[in-house]
Image: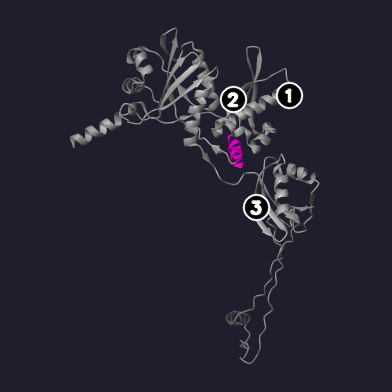
Amino acid sequence: MRYLALLMIGCLSLPAYALTQVDIYRTEVAIDSTKDKGEELARQQAMKQVIVRASGYQDSVDNPVVTKALQSSARYISQLSYGKEGDVMTLKLLFNDAQIRSLLTQAQLPFWPTNRNNLLVWLVEEQNYDRKIVWEHSASNVSDQLKQAARDRGLPLTLPVGDFDDITGIEVSDLWGGFAKPISLASGRYPVDGVLVIRAQGNSLRWNLYDQSPGAIARSNVAPVTGSANGGDAATQLINAVADFYAKRSAVVVLGESSESVVVKFLNINNAIDFFTLEKTLTSLNSVANLDVLEIKGNELMLRVHLLASQEAFEQEATKLSKITKFDDPLLVEDEENAVPVPPIETQVQPTKNDALTKSDEVGEPSIEPIMPTLNEETTHSPVVVEQPPAKPKYQMVFEWLS
């Protein structure tokens, strides 16, 4: 029992780390006053940043659905305000998280959850054969570039504070040589999910990523993830590589219906050429994200159209196409007030034998036995017919394809 208690105390004393919640939907971008529609371009740039953070992939902004959504970036914004950095006006934006996730679903892009791995960064810079550790408040261009790139990708970073425990807890040679035990011991005081060791020589960066808690580094036989980057944007390359590593492992593609969609019926779809031409035509519209085929019956096609705009905007775009014309379907009930009400069913209750006896007793008249029908007599009952209104169709719009 004593050993069990000691084991439990030992387990409780181990640090328990949790992922870090990242605010990926808030951003600030500069407004280029030298360009026409500078504010609109700034909104689009801000939305691109949010899409990359939310999906975890840099090329997500090249997705056709996202490209069309960027043209109406204002509808995805929840809050907007202005700021200033020096002499440059900035735009502070908060995007609607539900709408951004819905857009990723429409574009069939992954979503990188906002709870993400926090990394402790040990950065060693070499200048003129002199190596030094960069602390949280040290003046360092490389450190500043790393922090900015991490903010752009939504990757949480922590730099050591550089207090007495840090300075005496590890040597520069331990970090430069990549010795696991001293790195593990020195990093253990920070509540992080991984450790990133970077060695900087001019514009050249080499890095080791220990994808485990600090305490597990010394005990583990797993080799760190390694990489290198060169050039003026080496810090950005490094952060992109690390962010891609975690995004590929954690991001998921959410499959489901878009919150904005409309079921549309198309007539006169006679062959495969008509079908594929219609599909290509619809997906080229700015209001359309993608299509789902629901039913093909004869020359009729029923589609669920996932929208990036309102149904009215989609209808206006569709009717402007030369090969599509709106069809007035009499089954479409546009107003529920026009529905035919169902009349109440009137029934007559015939008095029973007991009722007849009771009533006759009350007035003092002699009781009269009711005449019951014999087996040879035919009794007929007229069925009650209730006229039901026509069923509402499954579709909301009807168009005819002019092939």
Which residue is at the front of the view, 60 or 358? 60
Q: Residue at x 70, y 23 (%)?
A: 39
Residue 147 in view (yes/no): no
Dot 3: what SS?
strand
Instruction: Work out whether 14 lies above or below 319.
Output: above
Marks 2 and 3, the one that precedes in the sequence:
2
Q: Residue at x 62, y 26 (%)?
A: 93
Which residue is at the front of the view, 75 or 302? 302
Q: Residue 293 has which mark? A: 3
Marks 3 and 1, the one that precedes in the sequence:
1
Query: Label 3 neighbourhood size at 10 Å, few (<14), some (14-19), many (20+)?
Result: few
Instruction: Where is residue 265? Give x, y as percent.
Output: 72, 54
Instruction: Work out whether 247 lies above or below 134.
Output: below
Instruction: Where is residue 375? Give x, y as percent.
Output: 61, 91
Instruction: Work out whether 244 lies above or below 260.
Output: above
Q: Are marks 2 and 3 in contact (CB under 8 Å)?
A: no
Q: Which residue is drawn at 70% across and 69% down?
A: 386
Indicate whether residue 98 is drawn in magenta.
yes
Indicate whether residue 102 is drawn in magenta.
yes
**Distance between mark 1 and mark 2 Cα atoms:** 19 Å
| Disc 1 target residue | 37
**Distance between mark 2 and mark 3 Cα atoms:** 38 Å
Residue 4 in view (yes/no): yes
**Residue type, numbered disc 1:** Lys
Instruction: Where is residue 174? Give x, y as percent.
Output: 34, 17
> Looking at the rendering, which quadrant does residue 374 occupy?
bottom right
Question: Where are the magenta residues, as a range?
Answer: 96-107
| Image depth: mark 2 or mark 3 in front | 3
**Residue type, numbered disc 3:** Val
Colour setup of the view: one colour
Dot 2: what SS?
strand
